[in-house]
Amino acid sequence: MADTAPLHRRLRQLPRSAWVIFAGMFLIKFGNFLNVFLVLFLVAQGFSAAQAGLALAVVGLGTFVGNMIGGTVADKFGRRSAIAVSMFGSAAATAAVPFTDGLVTTTALVGLVGVFAQLYRPAAGALLVDVVEGEQRVMAFAVLRLAVNVGMAVGPLVGGLLSAASYTYLFSGDAMFSFAFGTLALLLLPAGRPPKAAVTVAEATGKGGYREVFTDRPYVLFLLSMVAATFVYGQATATLPLHVTDAGLSNTAYGLLLGLNALLCVVIELPLTKHTERRDPRRVIALGLLLLGAGMGLTGAVSAVWLLALTVVVWTVAETIYTPIANAYPAEFSPAHLRGRYQGAEGLAHTLGGTLGPAVGGLLYGINAPLHWMVCAAVAALGAVLVLGAKPGVRQTEAPAAETPEPVPAATN
């Protein structure tokens, strides 16, 4: 069994293409300066806070569109092509942002950045499924999350220094990291085209596209559970800071709570995944969502910083339990020629939950804060119930894979 091997050996057995994706994800999350500093940049340019918020909302809309387009591009033209177009397009649009004038032009351009910057996501997920054997996929997605978390933790520190010098430097740096991932993709990744036979059969029978994805009832249940999960998890940055302030604590205390979350993710996720990956995915995800709801739900009942830290530990453990399994789970549903679209639909679910979470959560918190935290617990519990019904059908999902996966190199000492 794969789970009996030491963790370091498991990691060394992952194919080269997987490590290229990990490296690329680290680069673009490290250099994700536009999303982090866009509001500050626009206010510094003389735009109002409301106008800056509008521009940020348009970026979110762009990511919504990019997810959907990206899944189609990945399935029709190959994973590598989708990643390259995404990264080079994002680099060009981001580099141009400091040189725009006017609200309409700037908002349109950052919306375009949102489209390009998210277009790669379904392709990266589909390619990871293509090249990594089934028993290794959960661990591969856990490593992917590690790369993302480390990049997001360190990148803003560098971005702050660059923004102090010049916003042109800041956005040029963002563009450079995107360009670097695009170059790595072209040089080191396989094309990742779905098998022609599967595409031909799908076209002949009228099947394929997002229509097939969204008529896959068990998968739709999974997607709804991910909307619920992201809705609740989004409160960590939407309403948790409001609760911390209302409890009379400082911004520093809130920063420490988020730092605790990031540290725990980095330290415990891979070892924990080694034990959860062999379990029933639906039960693992359901357990994680129940813990997520418990951690967030208890937030409203405590105000001391050490008690809040305990709630953070609970929902962070939940995050590390369900997220790697959930990220790999779409592969259990998707035929090879639709992997990009299935990944795109999952990204859409996270985008929808991430949009509804701050909007609805903020509104509900303002009306009745204790009720808000109870609703979070209930939404997470609903997600757990939904995912228990998300059992993949009997369709063949493993063969044929997109092109021929790389041979797995033997572990070396």
Image (cartoon, helix red, strand yellow):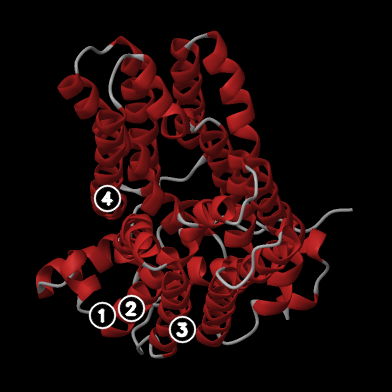
Examine the rendering and report whether any part of residue 192 can be seen: no
Kindly identify which residue carries mark 3. Answer: 381
Foreground tag (1 vs 4): 4
Percent x, y for residue 386? 38, 85
Q: Nearer the viewer, residue 93 or 263?
A: 263
Amino acid found under the numbered disc labelled 4 = Phe
Q: Mark on residue 64?
A: 4
User: Up-down: is 349 above or below 146?
Assistant: below
Mark 3: secondary structure = helix
User: Do residues under tags 1 and 3 come within 8 Å of each other at their CB atoms?
Assistant: no
Q: Residue at x 39, y 32 (%)?
A: 87
Percent x, y for residue 130? 47, 60
- Distance of mark 2 from mark 4, alpha carbons? 19 Å
User: Do residues under tags 2 and 3 come within 8 Å of each other at their CB atoms?
Assistant: no
Q: How many marks?
A: 4
Q: Residue at x 71, y 54 (%)?
A: 260
Mark 1: secondary structure = loop
Q: Residue at x 40, y 60 (%)?
A: 402
User: Do residues under tags 2 and 1 come within 8 Å of each other at their CB atoms?
Assistant: yes
For residue 144, side relative to residue 53 (left or right): right
Kindly identify which residue carries mark 2. Answer: 219
Which numbered disc, 1 or 4, marks the residue that appears first in the sequence?
4
Mark 4: secondary structure = helix
